[in-house]
Image: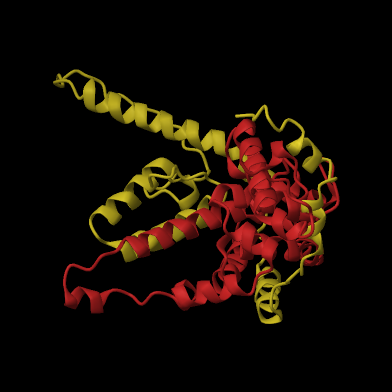
Amino acid sequence: MRDEHLPDELDEYLRGASPLSRQYQRESAPVPPHALERLVLNAARQQPVEPKPSLKSQSLAPLAFAASVLLSVALVLAIVVGPAVRRADDKPHVVQVRVYKAEPPRAAVASPRERNPAAWLADISALRRAGRNGEAELEMRRFRSAYPDYIIPVSE
Amino acid sequence: MLPKMDLMDDDAGLMLRYRDGDTAAFSALYAQYKGPLYRYLLRHVRNAGAAADLFQEVWSRLVAMRTRYEPRAKFATFLFHIAHNCAVDFFRRDLNLRGVVPHDLDSAFLEPEVPEYQRPDKVAEFLEQQSALLAAVAALPQEQREAFLLREETGLSVEEIARVTAVPVETAKSRLRYAIRKLKKSLSPMQEPEAPRLRTYA
């Protein structure tokens, strides 16, 4: 909402020509205490470098997914369609399933980053409503480390 | 104030180097941003203890997510967006603490102690140590204070401030405009003590 009475006030300030800005820059400029600096820098240096996923494992991921789908379809078909009543002269059917040497499908419990942020926040709200504030805070910390740049609605 | 930077600035390059394991790049980033970040937090949350905690938390989050870092904006925008989120969390926690009303004496004893930095006397002590301008900044509404501090400490444009605080550009502009107006208004008697005042008397 622009105030028509002072059209140049913000422009003047943004140009850096404002006395207000000059006065602020003359203020003292505190810096973090040394002990705090050591904590931050040590933490940053101690973090091991995580190896990037190799090209081989990346390229195998679609194959692993395809293998999972194939197996699932085969299982569903086996349950829904068969086994029919077997006649005496029926020849045994051979079902061929290709098994790929690759990663198994994703585990049932999602890793923090894979967890849906909205659902996660809903869980945290539910904990707060239940009065379990300690757990809610803990979850919120986990959430923040998984999604540091996620915008949380004010109502959460 | 930080020097003006391009969209893909050198600092984003430093962050990429840190992502790939170069800790010296982190030190360079830290040296450049520690002052502006600390002052932004200190003057935004208005408490030295809380600011120190948040300062550490911001860097911890940056370290934790470094492997996922992809430069999509200026590094300052990225860093201060994390700081903004930390501050939002802080104010939310603070609100929750203040909102707790014990129903009986027993539960009052069971409630966790209010951290020292949130004690009213500590907050008052912080405010008393400020100059007139900083006291006026501290008295601004939270969103206006943040917009002003982001501008002064980082030199971010209005568009970038909007991005950091996740609001439309017009909202960021409006917050900054009101902040400037209030600060000017609260400081004007001190800035011009001998200025003649025209008054008319009936």
The answer to which quarter of the image holds residue B153 is: bottom right
* Nearest the eye: A33 or A71: A33
Out of B197 and B80, give the one closest to the viewer: B197
Give residue A37's position: percent from left, percent from top: 70, 75
Camera-side residue of B129 and A115: B129
Residue A24 placement (x, y as % from top left): 76, 59
Q: Is residue A118 visible?
A: yes
Q: Quadrant of residue B54?
A: bottom right
The residue lying furthest to the bottom in this view is A35
Q: Residue placed farthest to the front in the image? A: B202
Number of residue marks: 0
Q: Residue at x 52, y 73 (%)?
A: B124
Spot occupied by residue B116 in the image (x, y as percentages of width and height): 46, 78
Where B200 falls versus B120 (above or below)?
A: above
Residue at (32% x, 50% y) in the render? A125
Colouring mode (rainbow / by chain / secondary structure / one colour): by chain
Quadrant where the N terminus of chain A lies?
top right
Location of residue A149 in the rendering, given as x and y in whole percent from the top left corner: 57, 48
- Judged left or right of residue B128, residue B150 is right
Residue at image location 73% in from the left, 72% down from the top: A31
Viewer-closest of A18 and B189: B189
- Res. A54 visible in picture: no
At x 32%, y 60%, the residue is B99
Q: Is residue A5 above or below residue A138?
A: above
Q: Is residue B59 above or below residue B80?
A: below
Q: Is residue B33 left or right of residue B119?
A: right
**Picture colour for chain A:** yellow
Q: Colour of chain B?
A: red
